[in-house]
Image: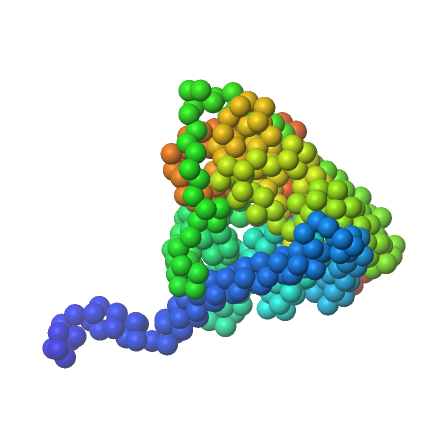
Amino acid sequence: MAGTSRRYPMLRRSRAMWGSRRVWQPRLVFWAGALGIGVISVLFAVLADRAQELFHLMTGDGGGWRFYLPLAVTPLGFVLCAWLAHTFFPGSQGSGIPQAIAARHLRDDEDRSHILSLKLVVGKIMLTIVGLFCGASIGREGPTVQVGASLMLQAARWGGMAQARGLILAGSAAGIAAAFNTPLAGIVFAIEEMGRTYEARTNGLVLTAVILAGLASLGLLGNYTYFGVAKDTISFAAEWPLVIACGVIGGGLGALFSLLALKATRRIRRWNTGQPLQRALLVAAVCGLLVAVIGIASGGLTFGTGYVQARGAVEGTPLPWFFFAEKFLAGLLSMISGIPGGIFAPSLAVGAGIGSSLGLLFGASTGAAALLGMAGYFAGVVQAPMTAFVIILEMTGNHDNVIALMLASMLGYGTARMISHEPLYHALSRVFIAEAIRRRRAEAGPGSAQG
């Protein structure tokens, strides 16, 4: 054996390299980080579901004085979340996807640490759960992206890895994959939404992170489809008007959500400049009260993620005619309130409501129409059509509808681009980039501009 090593020095160097701690330590830390994302994502999902169950248990089933508790609980919960986010966890506000996008554009590790850190992992999870316990119309999927990116960036620091941008991308993809049990959607999301300048050399990082996070999720929860299995098959020849309507109307409403969210967020930020904390708490209180009023008016349907309503529609149970409008407003108010929480699940619920209403209008099956509405609306909100149809296919387990969902997603995306030219997450990410630049200039002092 020793003679073989002498004759083949390349083999000897290869053995030495693979036996080196410098080679194995980064890999082990990276693998541990990816598995950690899967485990924490599952724990986050379980706690989020429990929080919603407790809220509905607390407020009753539509009768008695407890049904009106949200008028007090929801605004107080919004204020508490906004205060904690502003005081102890700055950078945790909102979805979490804009923070992960911004971190990929920032070059300095200290700047990244303000929006991706272990402290923010704790804050993001805790405050999202509190928000759901108070009835906020938010989701956990966007926050899971920030959690995944933070964990992977921390793993990079511990393992001495230099590919920060690629690791943030990998952590974000792993977060989506573990949150929905949708590994393909995690990869597509990384390429289309997170990395508009995607680099092929990050393929291995993204794939490995998604596989390991997915294995951890499967080990804890087993294999499942997020919305169950969709049994309805879209007959394109007979239902093409429904496909077009869901794509165009869903995309238009998705773009409207994006446009209103951006305009409201910018105006609130400008208004908050003088007294940031007091005014932020006032905005949170008003938004929380309005979310409570809408929730009570809807019979409690708009509180929380909207998962139950969306799943029911996918499985064939029609939603009330105006559910989509009520959920649209509740989701918009929750987003602009400044509390931590995502828009993925609420957006899918709005889309299911749009599809359900259009299905009744066109005389089509509710399940098929809900799928098309989800694809059109979600593509309109995030302007990421591939992510929209892939994530819905994986969450419903029916691949017979792939062409119809692709068309609805593309129509939704095309309609949204005509109404709102700024993709929502990327527009919001620029806020965090601008804050990092301002912080740098403030640290450099007044003479830095002239230097």
Q: Position of residue 150 (x, y in %)?
A: 56, 63
Query: Could you tell whether 301 is left or right of 360 in the image?
Result: right
Query: To which quarter of the image does residue 413 belong?
Result: top right
User: Can I make out residue 238 in this image?
Assistant: yes
Which quarter of the rendered picture does the N terminus lie within?
bottom left
Camera-nearest residue between 148 and 345: 345
Q: Residue at x 59, y 68 (%)?
A: 118
Taking the view exactly as shown, the residue that stands out farthest to the front is 64
- The residue located at (61%, 47%) in the rendering is 306
Place of residue 89 in the rendered image (x, y in percent of width and height, measured from the top left): 70, 65
Q: Residue furthest right?
A: 274
The correct choice, above or below, for 104 with respect to 162 in the image is above
Q: Position of residue 185 (x, y in %)?
A: 45, 46
Pick the front one: 436 or 306:
306
Answer left or right for 143 relative to 219.
right
- State left or right for residue 178 relative to residue 114: left
Question: How is colour applied across the structure in the image?
Answer: rainbow
Compared to residue 400, the image places residue 82 above or below, namely below
Q: What residue lies at 14% left-to-right and 79% top-to-bottom? A: 2
Reply above or below: 117 against 321.
below
Residue 362's x, y, as percent?
55, 22
Nearer to us in this view, 386 or 360: 360
Q: Quadrant of the C terminus?
A: bottom right
